[in-house]
Amino acid sequence: MSKPLVIGCGGVASVAIQKCCQNAGTFPELCIASRTVSKCDALKAKLEEAGTPVKITTATVNADDVEDIKRVITAYGPDLVLNVALPYQDLAIMDACLACGVHYVDTANYEPEDTDDPAWRAIYEKRCREEGFTAFFDYSWQWAYAQKFEQAGLTALLGSGFDPGVTSVFSAYALKHYFDEIHTIDILDCNGGDHGYPFATNFNPEINLREVSANGSYWQDGHWVETKPMEIKREYDFPQVGKKDMYLLHHEEIESLAKNIPGVRRIRFFMTFGQSYLTHMKCLENVGMLSTSPIEFEGKQIVPIQFLKALLPDPASLGPRTVGKTNIGCIFSGVKDGKPRTIYIYNVCDHQACYRELGSQAISYTTGVPAMIGAALVANGAWRKPGVFNLEQMDPDPFMEMLNQYGLPWVVQEDPATVE
Ligand code: NDP
């Protein structure tokens, strides 16, 4: 039995917390701590009204401040922290977990809020030269905690969302049950949903727009190949969604899968976007609205992308208006018993079904469910070992079982259409 502290109370957190309440055997109590405590109180009230058996408390925390996180951890006494705030807070929360002796789980790898910070820039530029990809986020910061977590006898589980997260577990499952060696992995993230707004993002706009406006890259024969943003476009006919255009992006699980899947030769990540989304994004970028550098406006410093976030619909509010389905999964090719083999493992998730169940859209749902599962497996000991781990380093079977149990059933298709 576990007593987690959940940090953050946005779209993903709301699903993860509601799923913890569906798993009260593992989580008989929990604390929700975030910057805006009224959001935590509102979710607690909703769950209590629905009759949850889980004892819920709430707290205010500034997760940029290690001391403040330590204060909340010490006051509540959790066995693990589930970080569903923003990637900017990952390192502060890991530091606080180490100081207080609690396990750590998150859904997205560290990136700095201020990418103009000269100390961070120097390390970033060195990494770009040495590794060959220019995304602002990478695992080096969090992997550097491995020895500290090992010595403390604590587990840090990185990236327990859908992608990364479920896609990492699909990779471990494919390797364990379907292949002797995997040669290529294509991760396909398709959102066939329509929210009816001219422009909105499905999760935190700042994080989302930074990710999709950056250069793409993929792993090939032991090194990174970088592309211009949206340079590589393909079309794929997704089961239960239909034909969609998709674009190659850099994505964090490529970095860890390249290390952890022995013999893999190529890993690519594609995400679907409609033309209208891309046109809006290009326009916002051209006028400087995606910039993370503060500017002076009427005597105040404002960060353009943060101002844009304030204008855009809150992703947590898209639930009632979004119709359609997501299809996220991986196409693997390789060899089994000396013969070539290709399989596609995917999940299809219906936006309206998610909304009916938890009041959220499918992007938050597909991230929040695996966040709860990762936390549960660390909590119950199945995935507890000292150090810092990505999900493909763990036994995939209990996670795959829980995906079926908690609303994200998956399909294995032999000989699917492949991506050129
Ligand atoms: P939201 O913006 O909806 O929620 C973020 C929450 O964190 C908010 O409650 C916010 O508080 C809180 N927060 C932000 N800064 C602080 C701080 N300094 N101290 C305390 N609380 C803070 O984001 P999402 O729910 O959409 O995303 C959550 C995470 O999930 C992100 O890291 C995102 O990258 C990740 N993600 C991962 C995916 C995957 O598949 N692996 C897919 C989608 C998202 P406030 O309410 O005051 O703003």
Image: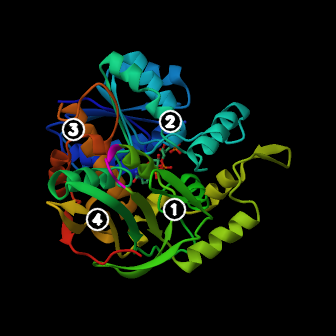
Magenta residues, start to end: 260-264
Of helix, strand and loop, which one carries label 3?
Answer: helix
Mark 1 vs mark 2, CA separation in Å: 19 Å
Name the N-terminal-most of marks 3 and 1. 1
Disc 1 residue type (three-letter): Leu
Of labels 4 and 3, earlier in sequence is 4
**Residue 128: quarter of image:** top right
Tell me the amino acid under the disc marked 2.
Ser
Residue under label 2 = 140
Instruction: Give the label, 2 or 4, closer to the camera.
Output: 4
Q: Is residue 53 magenta?
A: no
The answer to whether residue 416 is above or below residue 44 is below
Q: Main secondary structure of the magenta part?
A: loop
Residue located beneath label 3 in the image: 377
Q: Could you give the CA–CA distance between mark 2 and mark 4, rounded to whole angstroms? A: 28 Å
Distance of label 4 from label 3 (alpha carbons): 29 Å
Camera-side residue of 155 and 40: 155
